[in-house]
Amino acid sequence: MRDLEAIDTVGVVGAGTMGNGIAQVAATAGYDVVMRDIEREYVDSGLENIESSLSRFVEKDDLTESEADDVLDRIEGTTELTDLASCDLVVEAAVENMDVKQDIFADLDSAVDDDVVLATNTSTLSITTIASATDRPELVVGVHFMNPVPVMKGVEVVVGEKTDADVVALAHDFSEALGKETWESDDKPGFVSNRILMPWINEGIRAFDEGVATKEDIDRGMKLGTNVPMGPLELADHIGLDICLDATETLHEELGDRYTPAYLLKRKVDAGDLGKKTGKGFYEYD
Ligand code: 3HC
């Protein structure tokens, strides 16, 4: 496996919202980046997004004009997968479709050197299944960035059935080198983030549809009531409703009806472990 010190050039597959965000943070951290998409217009639109995001950092004096120019110079946009051959690590951020991802991983497997780690930004699909399209499943790992990538601090590291422990460590270290903070999830549908976030969004949409409140009050209620930056409907719009639907469909297919009260919740209440007020809930308190 190529370790963190050996990584100079990062490949990004997909120049959409997530791909261009990942390319931007990698180039901002000093890496050379090759960002690839299937059409030149997608590549150009990704580069434009990066330019506009960088200008927001310049406006706030977080970057100088010349630093922003250097970041852009470090990103090469391409439509050729073979241009990724020189990459020391590749992050895939293409559409959330297993067939497409498996095709990409099979192609990447032949395009890059044998010791290069192939990471996927998938939001809900199985790392293990994606990895099975390659001859290096031990070098395949999930690095799930959050949208907007240049702003959101978190990256979810997802461990496939065959992912090597060193590759997991590299995924954490690489994310941290991009200025992010990580948490780890097993390769279970939706991982930690979307397994919990998507039903929340879905229920917000249902509550609106069933006339519980106006969309504004649902969003306002969740923001004021639980101190989140966006309510479920605003957040769904921000993520993209198509992405939310794809993710929710995957969760539904894999997990079935998740809306009955959790057994563990009932068991804890019966046991009197009610949370902070009793000194013990899911955590323990002094
Ligand atoms: N590039 C650069 N800077 C950006 C940016 C971008 N693309 N988007 C926002 N910003 C900056 C703004 O310049 C601003 O900076 P400042 O506070 O220093 O002035 C700051 O972020 C806040 O932006 P705005 O003032 O425009 O708007 P908000 O205060 O409403 O914040 C937000 C926007 C950061 C998106 C905030 O609403 C938020 O954190 N929302 C929740 C986002 C979230 O939950 N994301 C995760 C979704 S789940 C996911 O991605 C997983 C996937 O698998 C579905």
Image (tube, rainbow, N blue to C red):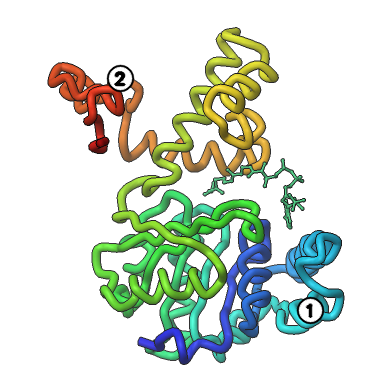
Name the amino acid type tagged 1. Glu
Task: Give the CA distance from mark 1 to mark 2.
Answer: 52 Å
Q: Is residue 41 left or right of residue 185?
A: right
Q: Tell me which residue sits at (20%, 19%) in the image.
A: 269
The answer to whether residue 101 shows anywhere in this view is no
Whether tag 1 and tag 2 are in contact, CB under 8 A, the answer is no
The answer to whether residue 234 shows anywhere in this view is yes
| Residue under numbered circle 1 | 67
**Does residue 182 sit above or below 198 in this rendering?**
below
**Does residue 62 sit above or below 220 in this rendering?**
below
**Does residue 88 sit above or below 262 in this rendering?**
below
Q: Is residue 198 left or right of residue 278?
A: right
Q: Nearer the viewer, residue 92 or 6?
A: 6
Q: Nearer the viewer, residue 207 or 170?
A: 170
Q: Tell me which residue sits at (43%, 57%) in the image.
A: 156
Quarter of the image for residue 40 reads bottom right
Q: Is residue 32 left or right of residue 183?
A: right
Name the amino acid type tagged 2. Thr
Q: Which mark is residue 216?
A: none
Q: Closer to us: mark 1 or mark 2? A: 1
Whether ligand 1 has any atom under 8 Å from the Cβ at mark 1 is answered as no
**Does residue 231 sit above or below 23 in this rendering?**
above
| Residue under numbered circle 2 | 260
